[in-house]
Image (cartoon, rainbow, N blue to C red):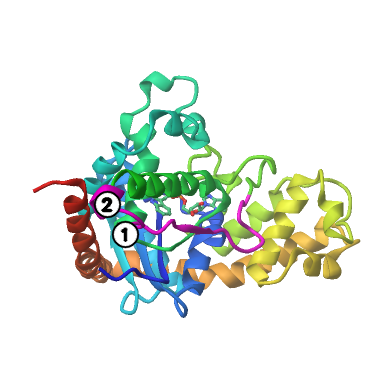
Amino acid sequence: MNKPQNRVFSGVQPTGNLHLGNYLGAIRNFVGLQDTHECIYCVVDLHAITAWQDPKELAANTREVAAAYIAAGIDPEKHIIFNQSKVSAHAELAWILNCVARVGWLSRMTQFKDKAGKDREAASVGLYDYPVLMAADILVYRATHVPVGEDQKQHLELSRDIAQKFNNDFAVNGGADFFPLPEPLIMGPATRVMSLRDGTKKMSKSDPSNWSRITLKDTADDIAAKIRKAQTDPDPLPETVEGLEGRAGADNLVGIYAALAGIAKAEVLKEFGGKQFGVFKPALAELAVARLSPITGEMKRMMENDQGYIDATLEKGAERARAIADPVYKRVREIVGFI
Ligand code: TYM
């Protein structure tokens, strides 16, 4: 079985409120990898139900993530876009990897601790086990590279540990080096976009305040209003990147500008250093609208008029994904000793 050299896998959960962090930290980087890699982009609906999802909303949110992928510029003919639950090998491999991963490893996952909150006993078993399914997503394609935002780094380290332990545990039966250790790709100046209301908190889908995030459904007016209200401080912007230290809100907005413009933060400060937020915020709003509105407009069009195209794309993508995943899983079955 040939080992792929340049295979990318990544996923986004269809839990609604797709936001600027998802776009700058992940989806935009997915687009950039298409010329150099074979890419598989998944809408991870099995992950979404680790917390309760209204079934009707789950279906709409699944289509919305697929629409975002396509509208952002991922080519579903050249690469693969599909939703996870359509390819059963993910869940099947996850079970085997459950028996490789250790409880102690999962107990260290900070995202579980954050998401489960104080009442850990009441969290779903799926939420705890979530990173093992994530490892299965990647390994069932023997993917080599995984573009993600900073918050997924720990999960990717776990995926590498699981791959390594599987290879060792089953070396006796042809498993040595079977899974590549996937490399995280955490790229660009906005790997961790922060809340617009609190620059020390990550921008997230689940923040109760809609003012905390720019979503891929926001209109131009929404975007401008949210940036105008974004938390900053009274000082003008610094001349250097070091000057952003201790100024979380300012740092976040400069990072967003840099990522949207495709330049480094230092270059943003060359232009805006010494200027007040009264000057910088309107410039940022203009840039954000210019970059995002073609994407949000196309998403809206697809969601309103072209659901058939989205569903057909996911179905075709799943078929092509199965053609890669099923033989890998079949080989895993042999390695493990299943007949
Ligand atoms: P999810 O749906 O929470 O987020 C999707 C992607 O967006 C990135 N991201 C951010 N980047 C920058 N700033 C932020 N504030 C921000 N918030 C989210 C995430 O890092 C992610 O890349 N477990 C994953 C989904 C997943 C996956 C996988 C990813 C399932 N299986 C296999 C890679 C490979 C998640 O919950 O992403």
Query: What residue is disc 1 on?
Result: 63
Q: Quadrant of residue 3?
A: bottom left
Count of picture labels: 2
Kindly identify the residue that appears in the image at 33 percent across and 29 percent down: 124
229 is higher (above) or lower (below) than 5: above
Using a 10 Å C-alpha cutoff, classify the residue at mark 1 as few (fewer than 14 neighbours), some (14 to 19) or many (20 or more). many
Q: Secondary structure at mark 1?
A: helix
Q: Secondary structure at mark 2?
A: helix
**Can you give x and y, in whole percent of width and height, for residue 146 in the image?**
46, 60
Mark 1 CB near ligand 1 (8 Å cut): no
Location of the N terminus by quadrant is: bottom left
Of residues 323 and 278, which is closer to you in this image?
323
5 is higher (above) or lower (below) than 14: below
Kindly identify the residue that appears in the image at 58 percent across and 46 percent down: 203
Q: State the predominant SS element of the stretch in magenta.
A: loop
**Can you give x and y, in whole percent of width and height, for residue 212 in the image?**
60, 45
Amino acid identity at mark 2: Ala
Of residues 263 and 148, which is closer to you in this image?
148
**Can you give x and y, in whole percent of width and height, for residue 173 in the image?**
23, 51
Judge whether residue 167 can be spotted in this image: yes
Asked if residue 203 is among those painted magenta in the image, a careful observer would answer no
Q: Quadrant of residue 241?
A: bottom right
Residues under labels 2 and 1: Cα distance?
6 Å
CB within 8 Å, label 2 to label 1: yes
Query: What residue is disc 2 on?
Result: 59
Asked if residue 189 is among those painted magenta in the image, a careful observer would answer yes
Residue extending furthest toward the left: 339
Per the rendered image, the range of residues in magenta is 171-193
Judge whether residue 64 can be spotted in this image: no
Amino acid identity at mark 1: Arg
Of residues 252 and 103, which is closer to you in this image?
103
